Image (spheres, rainbow, N blue to C red):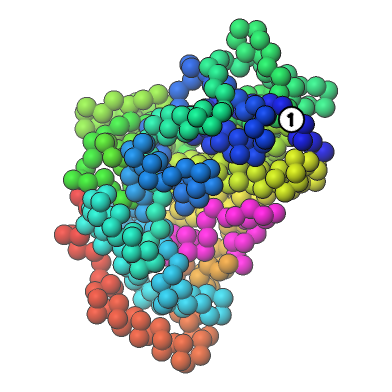
Amino acid sequence: MLNLRNATRAVVIGGGTAGWFAALTLRRVFAPQVEIRVIESPEIGIVGVGEGGLLNLIDALRRNGIDVNEFVRETGTAFKLGFSYEGWRTGAEDDRYYHLFGRPGLQETDWMEGGFRPLFSGMVREGVELHRYIPGFAAIASNASQQEAAAMLQLGARSGLSASFHFDSHKLADYLRRVAVSRGVVHQQAHVEELMCDAQDMARGVRIDDGEIIDLDLLIDASGLARLGIGKKLGIRWRSFSEHLLLDRAVPFHMPHPQQNPSLVTRAIAMPAGWMWQIPLVERVGAGYVFSSAHTDETQVIDEIHRCIGPDVEPMRTLRFEPGHFEQVWVGNVMAIGLASGFVEPLEATSIGQMLEQLRNFERIVTAGDGVVSGHLIDGFNEANARCWSGIRDFLRMHYDCPRRDTAFWRDVAALPLPPSYSELRQCFQQRTPRLIDVQNYAIHGWQGIFHVINWLFVAAPLGVVPPEAAAAELASLPAASRQRVAIYMNRLRELGAADSISKEERPE
């Protein structure tokens, strides 16, 4: 049992996005007399040159009482409406598909029958790109400005899109720090030398570089890849995903905007030994090449970046990682979040999405228990966290279940074994489209899934994981009136030209 009713101090090791979101959460959870302290090393920089959120980012801002308009103004964020995957199927210049943040509320496409959405199945059956059902896609294709995108999103459900943000990690952390400090959070710059634990592995204090020992009742480890608490001190076992995901290095860099306006989607551009992310911020693009060290090295990657982007690009320090997570991230009164708890790769912005879900559930459990948390609840938290990571692993593995075979990397990644859970899903998707029952077990014990049915379909259909025949088979099971409704919708899409590929004039340069 963990009893936090009489807590006097909670300490967060590390700042950054994770650390300051944790501090804001703790400040709300605990009474005003409980000190919330963030100990941040001035020597350790923030990982990443640009980041993108998922839809739970805006929810987290609102939950922490942060005005979204102020957040945008103070951090220079840009709208993010989804992802663009370029070159993942054929490698050709016109090879592009989209995973967009579709918004519920479009009456037609929200129609469900027999456990699936017949209109989506109609599009898959006839090879229509799924983003074409979204009215707001025109803003993405035309490289609309931030002001035009904001006006489009004001249409609400009629736009067909929800939004998150692209942001500069440094500006975001600085903004969250200022908000947290204004609410009474103590900010201390120091290097944590040691985590002091008792015989039961309960954290009792941290020793910093001047020898001072700071007592504590709760520790949140947001130390990033240093992983000072759960990893180095407590030695919790690591669950590796390297058997299923090859990428383990990344070279970040900055670049100018390739278009007049910041793109409204994160670009994921396939490269010979991995892929390149381009995250459009207001002033520039935060980018990086994430690659497999078994297929190339840093020197070759930098040469590729210079050939692709230009000779003036200045690469930053190479980041090294092993995809996976700690089997337990909450042990006693120590909880690791963000990179300190696990990391897979930058694809689909899973790191910040998972971190915010960890904090939401920590708050839910501590609040519901009035500060008294049973070991059973902590076990459930760890089980749910691991299950969520499994869902992320499987979703990302599906992205590499693609037809490219032109380099050693793309051949080898295709030959990797599939996680058993994804292998089973894939067999189902060969017969029908994804359904809620397929993915709901990735979110247990009160957790909310990072990716939902539509997210899976947006990726599975373009890659052929859900073939047209599978959609045709499930449509054939519908009553005649429902099949006619699908036919009418598809005829309307044809009249609008939705079944045609995007013209060169529409495509972003």
Q: Magenta part of the protein: which range?
A: 437-464
The residue sitting at 53% across, 17% down in the picture is 189
The residue sitting at 33% across, 60% down in the picture is 154
Residue type, label 1: Ala
The residue sitting at 37% across, 36% down in the picture is 75
Callout 1: SS:
loop
Q: Is residue 4 left or right of residue 38?
A: right
In the picture, the quarter occupied by the N terminus is: top right
Q: Residue 497: x and y, percent? A: 24, 74
The residue positioned farthest toward the left in the image shown: 505
The residue positioned farthest toward the top in the image shown: 210
Residue 364 visible somewhere in the drawing:
yes
Instruction: Determine crowd level at label 1: few under 14, some 14-19, many 20+ residues with C-alpha closer than 10 A.
Output: some
Q: Majority secondary structure of the magenta segment?
A: helix
Q: Nearer the viewer, residue 128 or 162?
A: 162
The residue positioned farthest toward the front in the image shown: 32
Q: Nearer the viewer, residue 359 or 291?
A: 359
Q: Residue 413: x and y, percent? A: 47, 47
Vertical comparison of 171 with 426: above or below:
above
Quadrant of the rendered image containing residue 370: top right
Q: Residue 288: x and y, percent? A: 36, 35
Q: Is residue 507 left or right of residue 371?
A: left
Task: Tally the marks.
Answer: 1
Q: Nearer the viewer, residue 107 or 495?
A: 107
Q: Is residue 456 magenta?
A: yes
The residue positioned farthest toward the bottom in the image shown: 480
Residue 324 visible somewhere in the drawing:
no
- Judging by the rendered image, the residue that carries numbered circle 1 is 7
Vertical comparison of 365 with 75: above or below:
below
